[in-house]
Amino acid sequence: MTDDLSDFRPLDPGRINADDPVEVRYWCLQLRCTEEELRDALLKVGEHVTAVRDRLSARE
C-alpha cells in the first residue's frame, strides 16, 4: 500500500467511510486531524463531512 493519496478520491465526497482505512487517512490529511480526532468527531456528529469539519474546527 502506498502513502501517496494524491490521486485518491472518496466514492462519496460528502460522507466519511470510517470502515475504509485509506479513506480515513485521506480525510485526516484533508481535515488536518489525527485519526483519533476524526473518529471522535464521527461518533459525535455522524459521517457528513461538513458536520465533521465543523466539529473539528470547534476544537481550536
Image (cartoon, rainbow, N blue to C red):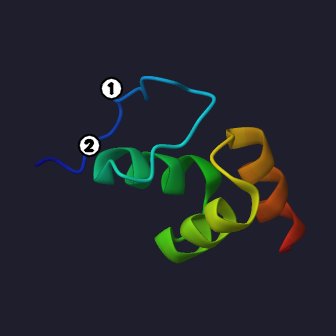
Residue at horizontal 51%, vertical 57%? Answer: 28
Question: In the visual, does 10 lie left or right of 48?
Answer: left
Residue 51, compared with residue 56, is above or below; it is above
Query: What mark, if any, has residue 27 been given in the picture?
Result: none
Q: Amino acid at mark 1?
A: Asp
* Crowd around label 1: few <14 · some 14–19 · many ≥20 (10 Å): few
Q: Amino acid at mark 2?
A: Asp
Question: In the visual, does 56 lie left or right of 35?
Answer: right
Spot occupied by residue 22 in the image (x, y as percentages of width and height): 31, 47
* Crowd around label 2: few <14 · some 14–19 · many ≥20 (10 Å): few
Which residue is at the front of the view, 15 or 8? 15
Residue at horizontal 64%, vertical 66%? Answer: 43
Query: Alpha-carbon distance for marks 1 and 2?
Result: 8 Å
Spot occupied by residue 16 in the image (x, y as percentages of width and height): 54, 43
Question: In the visual, does 51 lie left or right of 46?
Answer: right
Query: What mark, if any, has residue 4 been given in the picture?
Result: 2
Question: In the visual, does 24 lie left or right of 52?
Answer: left
Q: Residue furthest left?
A: 1
Spot occupied by residue 5 in the image (x, y as percentages of width and height): 33, 39
The residue pinned by badge 1 equals 7
The image quadrant of residue 49 is top right
Spot occupied by residue 56 in the image (x, y as percentages of width and height): 76, 63
Which residue is at the front of the view, 44 or 7? 44
Determine whether the residue tagged by mark 1 lies in a helix, strand or loop.
Answer: loop
Which residue is at the front of the view, 22 or 7? 22
The reply to whether dot 1 and dot 2 touch (C-beta < 8 Å) is yes
Q: How many numbered callouts?
A: 2
